[in-house]
Image (tube, helix red, strand yellow):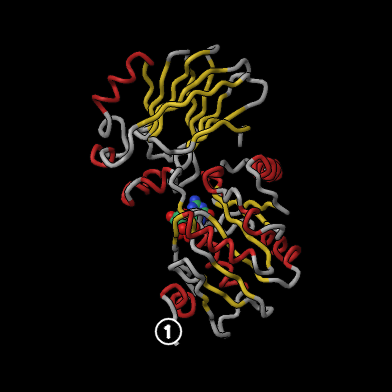
Amino acid sequence: NPICRRCFRIKHYNEALSAAVPADAFRHILEQIGYQDGLILHIADVFDFEGSLIAGLHRYVGQKPVILAVNKLDLLPKAINVNRLVHWVKKQAKANGLKVQDAVMISARKNIGFDRLASTIAAYRDGRDVFVVGAANVGKSTLVNRLIRDYSDLDLELTTSRYPGTTLDLVRIPLDDGRELIDTPGVLYPYRLTEIVPKHELQSLVPDKPLKPAVYQLDPEQTVFMGAYARFDFLQGAPQSFTFYTANAIHLHRTKLERADALYEAHKGEMLAPPTRETLTVLPPWTREEFHTDGKQKQDVFISGLGWIAINGDSGAKVAVHVPRGIRVGLRDSLL
Ligand code: GDP
């Protein structure tokens, strides 16, 4: 009885493999899930929260309960208040059209939050199957690996089922209680920087160690480059500080707004890096978007896949970001 490579790895090595499909194919998978009874475990990434949310999930899975597990907690400062973070996650999920039964902060890599996750799943599962969904690179395979080791019964026959319209099988992993954990491929969203850079640049873009925030005290008409991936202009407002949260490998560079265009042309891919000059030739040209804050509430400008910038002043600011065309950017309540 032939089984696919993903199933083979799980069965013989207890190891889930990452697999990914474009958003259209993923919609077919969600439609199929919609016809079945179960609990949805949605994995998101705290480093790219907005970009890793599956907006419109309810359109396909209806009223099924959704638990949101936000991974990579290890990247945030240790002193963080997790309860406050969970509150933020629920609020932001709702603002993005996602109604979640509960949210749990986890680190699949550092094994944080698993007891809480297991008890939350148990509380909402009601003896049903668990469908694991998430965007690519959020750490879904790392998480599923842990769940397999701790909760599955691999002596049972591992079954797979092919759904129409998809080239990838959904992997069904038997749980101890006779139900199944169903792993779906990760969905690829073209508006995340991580999905459009070549694979070899990913290691400089994706943080591997806890973020080291960089604080810049800026005057209006100053610019900070985030490597050659993006540029942040402080246009108007009282002098104030901005905190940059990006992977440590992203070189930040401050300059005057009036010099920024020329500096970019002269130094992109070299002093302003990563990425390399070569990679820049395959990325789309930049587009510019402006944001205004009134300072009443602390806000971040997020750049999907690259990180975020916290606006720290309390009297408002007008800023602009330049990012490769198509990359999602936005303003949100501050994460930290
Ligand atoms: P998938 O595409 O969602 O299945 O993601 P993977 O499990 O393959 O993980 C994608 C990347 O995120 C890999 O480089 C992992 O090492 C990394 N990763 C997974 N979990 C964590 C985590 O909890 N913390 C951090 N910092 N990185 C993680």
Q: Residue at x 42, y 84 (%)?
A: 2
Viewport quadrant of the N terminus = bottom left
- The residue that disc 1 covers is 2
Which x, y percent locates residue 298?
A: 63, 27
Which x, y percent locates residue 155?
A: 56, 85
Q: Residue at x 32, y 49 (%)?
A: 198
- Report helix, strand or loop for mark 1: loop
Which x, y percent locates residue 31?
A: 59, 62
Q: Residue 300 lies in what quarter of the image?
A: top right
Asked if residue 120 lies left or right of residue 315, the reply is right
Q: Residue 117 lies in what quarter of the image?
A: bottom right
Q: Residue at x 26, y 25 (%)?
A: 265
* Vertical position of residue 313 compared to residue 37: above or below: above
> Within 8 Å: ligand 1 and the Cβ of disc 1?
no
Q: Residue at x 49, y 19 (%)?
A: 217
Q: Nearer the viewer, residue 107 or 316?
A: 316
Viewport quadrant of the C terminus = top right
Q: Nearer the viewer, residue 227 or 26?
A: 26
Asked if residue 205 lies left or right of residue 85, the reply is left
Q: Residue furthest bottom?
A: 1
Q: Callout 1: 10 Å neighbours few (<14), some, many (20+)?
A: few
Which x, y percent locates residue 99?
A: 70, 49
Tag count:
1
Q: Amino acid at mark 1?
A: Pro
